[in-house]
Image (cartoon, helix red, strand yellow):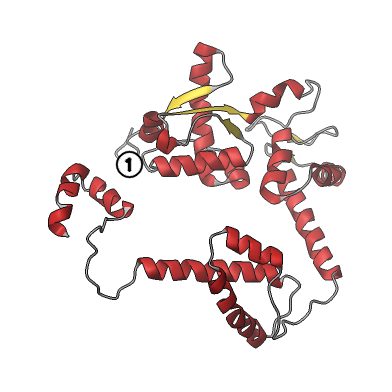
Amino acid sequence: MTLLVPERMLIFSPSLAATIGLEEAVLLHLLHDLSVCQRSRRHSQWIEIETITLEQLLPFWDRRELQRVSKSLADKGVVQIESAPLGASDCLRFCFYNDQKSATHSPSASRSPRPGSASALANNWRPDEDLLQLLALNHGISRAFALAQLEDFILYWRERGEVSHAWASRFRQHVLRQWRLQQQNEVAARPAARDLIGDWQPSDDALQILERAGINREFIDDTVPEFILYWRERGGNDGTWNSKFIAHIRRQWARYENALEYDQEPRPIPANWQPSEDVYDILRMATIDIAFACELLPEFI
């Protein structure tokens, strides 16, 4: 290893990162490498990786970040997690979703060429089930729509006579282009949207969504005139005023809460004041013992 690269590098697939996200691709490849070692000894679909091992191999993420990225992989249907959140667990117990459904895959189904082996597109080429599921999870594209684009995709590239080692990636791009084109056509075919009138009110569904997010109802009601004035001055018309209103309220509420948290107005310190978790994180990075810091709290107050 050189001074610039002092340790083993993490490797991940660029096309996978483009599909499920960069952070998710990095963690997924590491979990795959670790699972290979465990399976050679245990022959089990379920894998257990100690949290401290993940922290050592991925030192740029703390447990909260590891929990966030691993949960994202689970939400996308890539892995199935059985253990408690990493903040409360000493290990990550998981299995790959592909292992759970491998028995349903037909051995005669055409597979994509292995990375690194460029080849012409076969007449019977089909996308992997994983790609179809990721298109559905990440972009809301149904399996039926994706497969409906397959015939045109194969015809186009066979007529061009090109070779590639990433037909799956090209198919994904082709499906996304067709999906966006269809959405644009649907928008163009919609009837003209109505202007935002002065007595407009958000729908009950929009109010329920905001209230479930913990946003105060009085805050919501007070923000309606501001929202109407903003969009009437811009002269826009739209058929999705409720969606825009939800996004507007969430932004305004976040600013309001942030202003409360970082209020600059001077006032006496409360007798029960406690530092935030961010303060403790900074102390840990400075290698200051948290117990020692807590002992100084009464004197500080």
Looking at the image, which is closer to me, 102 or 112? 102
Q: Percent position (x, y) of residue 110? A: 79, 28
Q: Percent position (x, y) of residue 80? A: 59, 31
* Label 1 Cα neighbours within 10 Å, binned few <14 / some 14-19 / many ≥20: few
Query: Which of the 4 image quarters holds residue 100?
Result: top right
Q: Percent position (x, y) of residue 98? A: 66, 28
Which kind of residue does numbered mark 1 sit on? Leu
Looking at the image, which is closer to me, 127 or 237? 237
Q: Residue at x 57, y 16 (%)?
A: 44
Q: Is residue 247 among what the camera can see?
A: yes
Q: Quadrant of the C terminus?
A: bottom left
Q: Quadrant of the N terminus?
A: top left
Q: Is residue 8 left or right of residue 133?
A: left
Q: Residue at x 56, y 59 (%)?
A: 213
Q: Relative to 152, does residue 5 appear above or below in the rendering? A: above
Q: Determine the secondary structure under disc 1.
A: loop
Furthest-left residue in this view: 299
Q: Relative to 184, does residue 69 appear above or below in the rendering? A: above
Q: Is residue 9 among what the camera can see?
A: no
Q: Is residue 86 left or right of residue 96?
A: left
* Residue under label 1: 4
Q: Residue at x 70, y 23 (%)?
A: 102
Q: Relative to 244, does residue 38 appear above or below in the rendering? A: above
Q: Percent position (x, y) of residue 290? A: 21, 44
Query: Which of the 4 image quarters holds residue 105?
Result: top right
Query: Which of the 4 image quarters holds residue 300?
Result: bottom left
Number of numbered discs: 1
Looking at the image, which is closer to me, 253 or 73? 253
Q: Is residue 147 left or right of residue 165?
A: right
